[in-house]
Amino acid sequence: MKFIADFHIHSKYSHATSKFMDLVSLSTWGQLKGIGVMGTGDFTHPLWQQELKTQLQEVEPGLFELKPEYQKTITSQVYDSCRVNALSPHRFMLSSEVSTVFKRNGRCYRTHSIILAPSFQAVDAITKELEKIGNIKSDGRPILGCDVVDIVKIVLNASEQCMIIPAHIWTPWYGLLGSKSGFNSVHEAFGDLTQHIYAVEKGLSSNFLMNAQLSELDRFAILCNSDAHSLQNLGREANLLDTDLSYAGIISALRKNDKNELLAGIEFFPERGKYYGDGHRACGVYLTPEQTVACNGICPVCHKPVTIGVLNRVNQLADRTVEQAEKFASKRYRVVPLFDIVAQELKQADTSQKVQKMYHQILQQVGPEFYVLLKASTQQIAQASTPGIAQAIAKIRSGDIVISPGYDGVYGQVQF
Ligand SMILES: [Zn+2]
Ligand SMILES: [Zn+2]
């Protein structure tokens, strides 16, 4: 079965997340967006774990849906055009993210890892071990003072069917290969245990082509996930799969990194990511990697070292040129979230009533957001919205857009 999957999201129990990130809303928005399989996020958090156990039921091995009594409350909020059916279901997969902060050989490393689990039994086993290491109650994404290698051991000990996936590997802070507190290779981080790592998450500020510049990454499935902290951001990046609808089917596709099963990634334009370029947010300074070299990595405004972004970091670690990388890059679709497109066309904030109304009007008349962005005819979109919105979507599909790049925590801006 073909479906779109987003394995990395957060619940209302993670820091700086929307209070609306509960299971009923996630299920509603999963359908509006057109996401077939969505991570639950935060399964190590005791209160969230309780909600998962109370509100979800297993439908296929390792995949869950809301119990009927909870589903009842969402049907009225999902338009007929977006509602799931036997051919396009909506499922949850047990997932979580942990942050590890640790010293190795006198250096400090900070990394984030996504964990996928096949059952509540595995979730319980992982939680029990992590509880011994640090506080898992204060944050849905707990911060643990242990080596990332210990997390791999705990997770695989809980179940061989679990997966551990380094998250947003390129972000300067918390990325496994990040410029500030990361390693220079996946193998440097995991050593002999690298054989148990089958996938990495590329994060919003890099694309497949950039990842293909490192031959070391060839053997890993490169995943696109949203890391959403709000309903609106669900699926801003996602994966297109064609597998059995089961935990084992999905995991097997990731492990084999089989292009007939892990069909494509649906990715952000990396320039829009907030760590793409180099610079200083507070100083309003954006630099290309060449400009950073020219000023010796020192900010011309405050004279402190600039934050080295993802493009520069990829260049540092790459062993292939962009041209050489082309044939190794996975198949991808590039998208800009529909809220952003509508907001820009209507020249209003994405939170404004006008934008919200137009967004929902399009979904109601055309279908789930991914269908609108990837498949619907521009004529159909124009009828449901404006010719400008339809034209913007057509331009994004062909990559015919201009972007001023993001840097040091500032998102890049698109012009259609
Ligand atoms: Zn993270
Ligand atoms: Zn500065």
Image (spheres, rainbow, N blue to C red):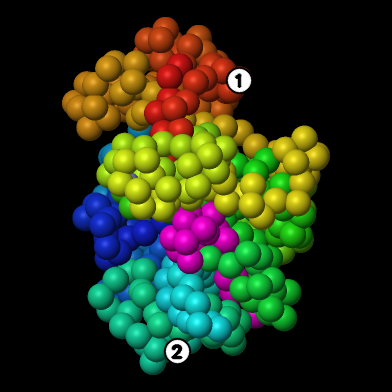
Circle 1 residues within 10 Å: few <14, some 14–19, many ≥20: few
The residue sitting at the bottom extreme is: 132
* Residue type (three-letter) at the residue carrying disc 2: Glu
Q: Which mark is residue 254?
A: none
Vertical arrangement, residue 48 with respect to residue 368, above or below: below
Q: Residue at x 30, y 64 (%)?
A: 14
242 left or right of 105 in image? right
Question: Does residue 201 sit above or below 101 in this rendering?
Answer: above
What residue sits right under mark 1 in the picture?
398
Magenta residues, start to end: 159-181
Residue 285, x across and y down, in percent: 36, 37
Q: Secondary structure at mark 1?
A: helix
Residue 302, x across and y down, in percent: 30, 46
Asked which quadrant contains residue 252, the reply is bottom right
Q: Residues within 10 Å of mark 2 (few under 14, many from 20)?
A: some
Q: How many angstroms separate mark 2 from mark 1 (CA)?
A: 48 Å
Q: Which residue is mark 2?
A: 129
- Overall secondary structure of the magenta section: loop
The residue nearer to you, when weighing 142 against 205, is 205
Residue drawn at x 46%, y 80% is 102
Query: What is the secondary structure assignment of the residue under circle 2?
Result: helix
Residue 144 in view, yes or no: yes
Q: Nearer the viewer, residue 353 or 371?
A: 353
Give the left or right position of residue 220, taking residue 10 as reference.
Answer: right
Q: How many marks?
A: 2
Where residue 146 sits: x, y (%)?
46, 84
Viewer-proximal residue, 215 or 278? 278
The type of residue carrying mark 1 is Ser
x, y (%) of residue 193? 68, 79
**Marked residue nearer the N-terminal end (2 or 1):** 2
- Which one is in front, 324 or 61? 324
